[in-house]
Amino acid sequence: MPSHRYQDIYAKIPVLTPDRTWPDRRITAAPLWVPVDLRDGNQALAEPMDPERKRRFFELMVAIGYKEIEVGYPSASQTDFDFVRLLATTDLVPPDVTIVVFTPARPDLIERTIESIQGIRGQVVVHMYAATAPTWRDVVLRRSRDELAAMIQAGAEQVLRLGGESVRFQFSPEVFNLTEPDFILELADQVTKVWDASPERPVILNLPATVEAATPNVYADQIEYMHQNLPRRDGVILSVHPHNDRGTGIACAELAVLAGAQRVEGCIFGNGERTGNVDIATLALNLHAQGVDPMIDFSDIDGIREIVEYCTRMPIHPRHPYVGELVYTAFSGTHQDAIRKGFAIQGDGLWEVPYLPIDPADVGRGYEAVVRVNSQSGKGGIAHVLETSYGVRLSAEQQVAFARHVQRRTDETGREATAPELKALYEEVYGCSN
Ligand code: KIV
Ligand code: ZN
């Protein structure tokens, strides 16, 4: 592997170590979740969502409890523009839901974005971004720090001028995680001054790990450094936006919340550019599994999954946390035995069933799939399936003997033995009279 072609983050930019407090903290309340499926997620699809899909996804997000939703990039496509117009001219947006529209810091695109929200009754956030990291400045934008700062200043002033009283403001220094911290502080000072950030009308400062580039503790340090040094901190909602290039988007978001982030942007089940945006369903259910109310209703996770799969036209992996088809299923004999014993003593109190981090019923799953039988399974699992599916109770000796029959059969076929197949085999071995 030509690993010498790559450098770690410390060689690229200064990572300033804060007086870190995040390692000793706990998450005790849900941050504000902001789904960006209709913008960032949508930008990553081979076939972007059509109006019907966008609307269905939006209605889903409202129904399960999201209160701030990024709804599109109105200057990028007519579909996005028209969708924002639909929201602006109908009562699809409940009064307690804020919509966010996304724009680059470019005069013509800002103008088009503001045009899209004309007449909207509810709360709107105008989200302006510009790429700030050195490689993007040098290679993509070909602007110096000062030129870029001037462009952002002009964009912020234009948004303020055109946006009006009911609009709130958001700024994202794209590729925050690879940008010099002193430049981020300079830009944060600039935009919070122009937008007059205050606790009454806070500015959202969103700090994306646009391309994940370091271990999650580094992102947490970067966020805590900003949390401790941001100007007008009480007038800022500190937001994070991790992507998942290293497969650690979830860890980045969780550590960032410990480090002071109040708002988390991501996609439900983690669609998004390349390896995806951080999965805000997993984040929410991780909180649930620790006894913290996630403030979003995942009690029908398969219904949510169906709509997300339909809108993105992408299937969800069977091992995907909390929602995958197999994530509440044990095939292995030792796990099945432990689960069976756990179910036998589980009452209404704290959930203590081994190998099941949450009760599948919390997300609308039944218990049928918890134990499935193949050649890796044991007598406990086989007995469990017969008992829960057909009320057939095997004696201790029968469990041992019958498991040998099942083992022989599953070894021969190399396949799973379904509940009806186990029942048929049971009848073959013992006749129908148990
Ligand atoms: O990943 C990203 O940086 C973004 C923006 C917020 C620009 O999607
Ligand atoms: Zn993004």
Image: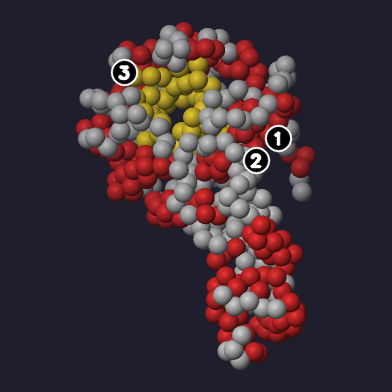
- Vertical order, 43 against 406 (above or below): above
* Element carrying mark 3: loop
In the image shown, does 90 or 149 lie closer to the viewer?
Answer: 90
Tell me the kind of residue under disc 2: Thr
Q: Residue at x 54, y 25 (%)?
A: 262
Residue 39 pos. (x, y %): 41, 38
Picture disc at residue 248:
2
Where's the C terminus, which quadrant?
bottom right
Label 3: few (<14), some (14–19) or many (≥20) C-alpha neighbours in 10 Å: few
Label 2 and label 1: CA atoms lie apart by 8 Å
Q: In this view, does 305 lie to the left or right of 383?
A: left
Q: In this view, does 405 lie to the left or right of 43?
A: right
Picture disc at residue 76:
none
Label 3 and label 1: CA atoms lie apart by 39 Å
Asked whether mark 3 lies closer than 8 Å to ligand 1, one says: no
In the image shown, does 419 or 269 lie closer to the viewer?
Answer: 419
Picture disc at residue 166:
3
User: Which comes sooner in the sequence, label 2 or label 1?
Assistant: 1
Report which residue position mark 1 lands on: 215
Tell me the kind of residue under disc 1: Thr
Label 2: few (<14), some (14–19) or many (≥20) C-alpha neighbours in 10 Å: some
Q: Which residue is drawn at 36% across and 17% down?
A: 159
* Element carrying mark 2: loop
